[in-house]
Image (cartoon, rainbow, N blue to C red):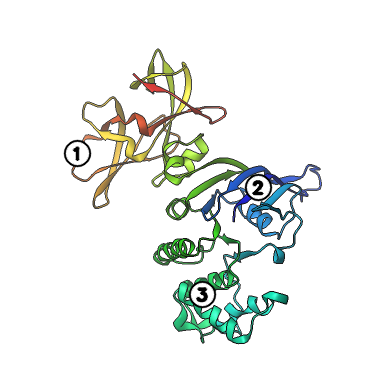
Amino acid sequence: MKVVLQNLTKKFPNRNKKIKTDVIAVDNFDFTIPDGELIGLLGPSGCGKSTTLNLISGLLKPTSGKIIFGDDDVTGLPPENRGVGLVFQNYALYPHLTVRQNIIFPLENLRGKDRMTKDEMNAKALEIARLVQIDGLMDRKPSELSGGQQQRVAIARALVKMPKVLLLDEPLSNLDARLRLQTREEIKRIQRETGITTVFVTHDQDEAMSISDRIVVMKDGVLQQIGKPQEVYDEPVNQFVAQFLGTPPISIYEGSVKNGGLYIGDERVLTVSAPDGDVNVGIRPEGYILDENGPFTCRLHNVEVMGRDISIVSSHEKSQTPINRSIISAENRVDLSSGTVKFSLKPAKTYLFDKKTGARIPFEVK
């Protein structure tokens, strides 16, 4: 099911009575979710991603704009008539019901031509339980399940009516790191097998990039960038997107372009074709090349061994953060006694941003 959001806006009254302007949670959101894709809605806390999800589900009514499922305008439809499945962060399972009863519960509310017999409901529940691999737990109560198993029950309950759209609101937040990794792989598998259009809300960029066909990055209710995860990582439209994606994060330095040279401090680190002026320079962790004759010098603090790679921890007086991490091959050897480390920079992993707006400035390397 294709989902189209047209100029979607949601405003809330300001709780501060002295401020008469409304709080804009979602601002003129315009986006098409292709049929059968898994979309990661990504951004920091308070950016409007959960509000957007609740607008799609019908739990909230938009201040303006339209929501279209396929060819149908569902903006005014209540949640129960939209054909959506919802999975929340806290699972929201019925503690007094078994796994089987929790999964069957949505089917018991079907009426008319959709009404099912008890045998049909049991068969459907078992089919979905097998899909999420909990068919051996059908007679247990939620208190007898692990966090990951409870999450699978919540997903099964959302899937049992085969919704047109599956909406997941930070479903992995309550799981430990190892279980999160396992469960997100399961969610991707289930989505591929069912082909249901899915929106996955998270503030965890690793999660979004690993699970999504496409990611939507939000900030303060405004859509910043849409694209395939690797494309957004490689080609961020602004400094916010560049800083939000990536682990370790991108390093940002105060720099300038003068007479065809990109300078960080007094060092000319690249020869570029770009307008002269002050800029912010972003360098991805993998954008550094260890080079004893390199043009960029940093103060060396430590080397962290990561197995296949090593992380060089350094600092620079023009950096906007106290430390920066550079990821290089473990085959390299770093002399900690020197106190400094020199790098050459990979142009494709180096970005220029406008100091005032944060917009990315295109450049060419000469």
User: Mark 3 vs mark 1: which is more N-terminal?
Assistant: 3
In the foreground, 72 or 12:
72
Q: In this view, does 107 lie above or below 51?
A: below
Q: What element carries label 2?
A: strand
Q: How much space separates mark 2 and mark 1, taking CA atoms?
A: 55 Å
Q: Is residue 62 above or below residue 243?
A: below
Few, some or many C-alpha atoms within 10 Å of disc 1 (few <14, some 14-19, many ≥20)?
A: few
The residue wearing badge 3 is 128
Distance of mark 3 from mark 1, alpha carbons?
Answer: 57 Å
**Disc marking residue 5:** 2
Residue sitting at 42 percent across and 67 percent down? Answer: 179
User: Are the residues flagged by discs 3 and 1 in contact, CB closer than 8 Å?
Assistant: no
Which residue was labeled with disc 1?
Answer: 335
Rendering coords of residue 207 (x, y %): 45, 55
For the C terminus, give its image quadrant.
Answer: top left
Q: Pick the residue in front: 120 or 284.
A: 120
Q: Where is residue 111 in the image (x, y as percent from the top left)?
A: 72, 76
Amino acid type for the residue under numbered disc 3: Ile
**Quarter residue 82 falls in:** bottom right
Q: What element carries label 3?
A: helix
Outermost residue on the front side: it is 113
Q: Which mark is residue 205?
A: none
| Distance of label 3 from label 2 (alpha carbons) | 30 Å
SS category of the residue bearing label 1: loop
